[in-house]
Structure formats: C-alpha cells, structure tokens
Amino acid sequence: MAGAAHEQWSSRFGFLMAAVGFAVGLGNIWRFPYVTGENGGAAFVMVYLACAFAIGVPILMAEILIGRRGRMSPPGSMREVALAEGKSRHWQWAGGLNLSAAFMIEVVYCVVAGWVLLYLFKALVTGFAGVDASTAELQFSNALSDVPGLMLWTVLGLAITGTIVSAGVQKGIERTVRVLMPTLFGLLVCLAIYNVFAGGFEAAVDYLFTADFSKINGAMILAAIGQAFFSIGVAMAGMMTFGAYLPKDISISQSVLIIIVADTLVALVAGLVIFPAVFNYGLDPAGGAGLIFQTLPVAFAQMPGGHIVSVTFFLLLSVAAITSMVGLIEPVVSWLEERRGFARPASTVMVVGAIAVTSVVGVLSYNVWAGVTVFGFDLNTALDFVPNQIMLPLGGLLIALFVGWFVSKASAQQELAMGNEALFEVWYFLIRYLVPVAVFVILVMGVMG
C-alpha cells in the first residue's frame, strides 16, 4: 500500500496513550458522570457498556483497520483501501469528511481549552480564595467578554499543541503522551482519594453507581448509544490517523478494548473527583460547563487545601484538553504533508495558524456576536451542531458501510488477525448490520433534535 513514509509508533503503549488521550476529553470529565447520574447511575453504565462494546468497539476497530491498511491520512487511507479492493477512489471524500469535522471541532474546542488554561492560571495565583457563587459567576462572565484575553489563552493552547505535533509522531506525540497520560491517571486517583476523606464521597458513589432500572427506556438507550459513539472519538480522523502509524504486529482488537475500558474508567473516576465536592457543599450537579467554571471554584474556596486541589484539578483538565487537541490537529497536519509535500513543522504552523484565525469566530460567539443567528441557531450552537450532530454520525456511518460492505471479508480478517474465528464473525455481523443502523439513528436524532 502507499504512504509508507509516515512514522510509526515505537510501541503499543505509546499508541494506547495517544489514543486514550484523544478519547478522554473535557466532555468525558464533566459530561459522562453527569449523564450517568441523571440516567439511572449503574443502570446507565451497564447499558452504556453494552452499547460501547456493540457499537464503539466494532466501529473503532473498523476505523483503525482503514488507517493501518492505508498508511496515510484519512482521505488517503480511504482511497488506497478502496482502490486495493477494486472500489471507487471517491471513498476518499468520506475521509475528507472526517478531516473537516476534526478541523471544525478543533475551532470550537480550542476556545474551551483556553478557558481551562485561564482557570489553571487563576488556580495557581489565587486558588479561588474567597470566591462565592456571585463572584464565580462574575469571573466567568468577565472571562467570556474579554476578547483579547480569550484569544491569548486560545492561542497559547494551540501553541502548546502545535509544538507537540511539529516534533513528529515518536519524538513529539508519543514522547509527550507517555508523560501526560500517566500524569492524568495519577492526578485523577489522587483527587479521588482526597475526596474519600474530604466529604461527599458516599453521595457521589450513590449518584453514579446506584442502579435505577426504572430509568431504562428508549430515551436512556439513545443517550447511551450517543455517549458510546461520541466519547471514544469515532469519525474525528484522529483514530484513523493514529491507526496509520500502528505497526502490523500490534493487535487492533486488543488495543481497542483497552482504549474503551480506559476511556470509561477515566470518565467514572472523574465523577468521583467532581461530585463529592458538589454534594458536600450543596451545589448543583447538573451544571454542565458551568459546573467546571462557576460551581467548582466555589467548592475550592471552601474546602481544606482548596488551593492545591484547584491547581491539581485544572492541571488534570489541561492535560485532557491538550491530548485531545493533538488528536484533532495531527490528522490535518498529516494530510497537508501528503497533499502538498510540506515539512511537518511548516504544515503544523499552517494548520495551527488557520485554526487560530478561524477560532476568532468561536471567541466572538460568546460576546460581540452572541446575538448572531444561523438558521435559527445562535452562532455558538451552530458551530457545535454541524460537526457534532451531522458530520460525525455521517462520517461514522460511511466508515461502517465501507468496511462492512466494500472491504472484503478476507481483507478485514487479515488486517484484524483476531485469532478467534467466532469473535471475528461477531465483529463482522455488528459492523455490517447493527452499527450502521445505530449510527443512522444517532444521525437522525441529531438532526431532528
């Protein structure tokens, strides 16, 4: 196959840390625990895991399969695999859709990552000492209205990410995630242990792990399907690109299982980090983004050792933000290297520069252009809706259809090398029949909703 000039991961550990780092983002840290609590606790976790293994595992295996078989950026890998199977080169447009979604998501995501870095700075300087509910709300409102400040922190996050990506796969991404991801895991565990003694831990455990089977209904199952699809980074180009760097002797199926289990565990432990403070200080667990930037600072101001805890927490979030941004920017850089033949540093500068310029729209959507609407949506909602509710499910559907119906069974079996015929047959059934239907439902519900 073409595209052998790309670097490869030096080890499975490096690949796993990069892939888990990409999957574990800011949404995992606050959204997954909140959705779990609101949808029946342990009952939702069980349904989510069933969906993750029935939908997330098969489609993620398919995406990495395409990447490793094609050995190129997503458009190139889709084209190469299609041509090798005697199919149309126009499948490359499905890879292009994934790439476009990654770029658009990064335009929005980098602004939120900028908030995290700003709050890490605030935690370092003040530890949120003396902050009450009204002060926290005012701080966040002032941060959103400060256009130069938002741009500064957004560009700083992009600069850190660009520095990592420009150094290459092994010397940049792999070397960084080998440090950052164990750091993230360590910070999570330390904060969870702290909460055992600080108060609110039992209430958080009840919220997350008490099974309320009465909440298992159609809406809850759809929420679990959607969470399983979005939380592991499917159709965002990152996993396919990381797969292109994966050596042939590393098992795709085993790696995917580890990625999904690690992603789920991080999200659940994050709940044991966030919600004890929420319940201990009588705060609202349904705060969404405000939970991180408005609610928790109030808790940090009241708790013993709050300065250290706040710094640790926002450092944790910063790691999650940066590793996810690496996974969104790397595919675009990889494509630009292939398409135009630019050196990696030059490609990185161009991609990061384009995202920084475009992110101005995202920054202004929170203040100067807050009243602007696009087809009835406010600008911020529109920027989030198009890639997340349309492009990602459509891209995931095309990946499932391509591998399930246009890649030969023999080729898939050879690439996956699962060593167990029965397990392969289960995967093949799921990717041909169940996954396309489930992802189509996600697409329809996203558009209708």
Image: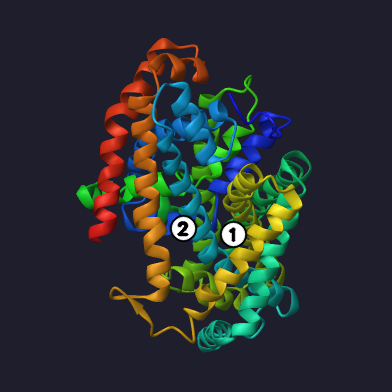
Number of on-image labels:
2
Give the CA separation, mark 1 to mark 2: 10 Å
Residue in the image at 44% along x and 59% along y: 31
Residue in the image at 49% along x and 68% along y: 278
In the rendered view, would you say 269 is above or below 92? below
Residue in the image at 62% along x and 70% along y: 114
What residue is disc 2 on?
204
299, 325: nearer the viewer: 325
Mark found first going from the N terminus, 1 or 2: 1
On the picture, is 429 further left or further right than 136? left
**Label 2 SS:** helix
145, 155: nearer the viewer: 155
What residue is disc 1 on?
195
**Label 1 SS:** helix
Q: What's the colour scheme?
A: rainbow
Label 1: few (<14), some or many (≥20) within 10 Å?
Answer: many
> Given the image, on which type of amino acid does mark 2 rest?
Ala
Q: Quadrant of the C terminus?
A: bottom left
> Given the image, on which type of amino acid does mark 1 rest?
Asn
Please say whether residue 304 is visible from this viewpoint.
no
Please say whether residue 35 is visible from this viewpoint.
yes
Mark 1 in CB contact with mark 2 (< 8 angstroms)? yes
Q: Position of residue 15 (x, y in %)?
A: 65, 35
Q: Position of residue 407 (x, y in %)?
A: 40, 23
In the rendered view, would you say 415 is above or below 221? above
Label 2: few (<14), some or many (≥20) within 10 Å?
Answer: many
Q: Position of residue 431 (x, y in %)?
A: 35, 29
In the rendered view, would you say 293 is above or below 55? below
Residue in the image at 54% along x and 37% along y: 76
287, 105: nearer the viewer: 105
